Amino acid sequence: MSFSFNFDVQLTTKGQQGEESKPQTGKQDYAVKPVPGNNNTTTPAETVKAAVEHHPPADPHFLLNDAVSETVTIGTLPPLHFLNESVFERTASERDDNERILSRTAAQSSDLISGVYEGGLKVWECTYDLLELLEREGETFGGKMVLDLGCGAGLLGLLALKRGASQVHFQDYNSTVIEQLTLPNALLNCQVEGEEEEEVKGRKGKKRGLQEEDDETIIEEEKMKKDEEAKSDEEKKNEQKKEGEDGSPSPKRQALDPSQHTKLTCCRFFSGDWTTFLALVLKEDLFPKYDIIFTSETIYNTAYYSALHDTLHRLLAPRGVVYLATKAHYFGVGGGLHLFEQFIEDKGVFDMEKLWDVDQGLQRHVVAMHFKTTIKS
């Protein structure tokens, strides 16, 4: 059964005091990255996953048609739009998926199949922790090179993009995640931001809020779409003329208008494991050195620590910073902050600084990593 929705709705849930509530994604809050299925182990697959660069399509319409988005708002940060997770799951059978991760995760009822699918279709709670920290600390990105490593939906990189980063690169293990989630999310956020800036000014000091469209809204959006399709060519021309006169095209027209996607020229998108991704990037004559590397919920498996460390070591700029958001421990998978701290200490390349300990639900942390002063990158 196909779903046909309009993605332009931007809603937030209000609390008792008028404050925006914490984002709700239809999943239990503070979920743990689960134990892989019975037929899987916590070690990575023996075969490497070749890295590939994915380019935005010349015509983005097919990525956004029939899409439903959510909007997360955190304090004074610009709104970040991303595809609705529950609708994405319900329409999985209609999506291109050469990796078959959508069908396999559904069949195994798992958000993680180690070495096959690494959880990129879900926005994990530590991502929201890092966004809150960035809002509180007032991190600026003007003119900086940024890497969102293990990006999934790409919210961290998209924040940097909307806050003036010169280049933002997105990497995820799965090509399906990049093509079906990260790229569409980038398109949703690469639109004119004048109205968003005014909205941000009115939200200073408020907490984050997010609300999925309810069934009544979905029905109404379907009706509006059908009405739009039924309009005559003359009516559509008149509407377009009117939009041009007042200078305020509809949000959907903005998102689908290629002229609004100039920020995409600042973005690159990669899939593959970290070892092959690093090798692919290092082949370039002037390979990037990133001022900021974001990585959230990526240290759940100790078998990946060496590849992650090598990637950070080779790609971080000498005065750069790595922001890592993580749980204290990933039950059933084996990794966590303590084990990663010990790994980093043994390597002797990075200093690690705890920025925020989150005590709500499962214990979570946001840390920063810098090169030791005695290490040359």
Image (cartoon, rainbow, N blue to C red):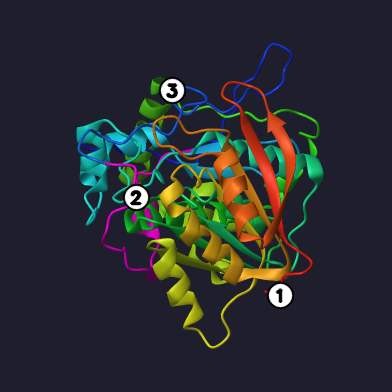
Task: Please name the residue that numbered disc 2 is placed on.
Answer: 232
**Residue found at the far front of this picture:** 346
Residue situated in front as seen by the camera: 272 or 244: 272
Residue 157: x and y in percent read 59, 55
Query: Label 1 crowding class (10 Å Cα cut-off): few <14, some 14-19, many 20+?
Result: few
Residue 33 — which label? none
Is residue 54 part of the magenta span, yes or no? yes
Q: Residues within 10 Å of mark 3 (few under 14, many from 20)?
A: few
Residue 284 horizontal/vertical position (percent): 50, 84
Whole-percent x and y of residue 32? 45, 29
Residue under label 1: 376
Dominant SS of magenta comes to loop
Residue occupying the point 30% across, 42% down: 113
Looking at the rendered structure, the kind of residue marked 3 is: Asp
3D distance between C-alphas at marks 1 and 2: 66 Å
Q: Nearer the viewer, mark 2 or mark 3?
A: 3
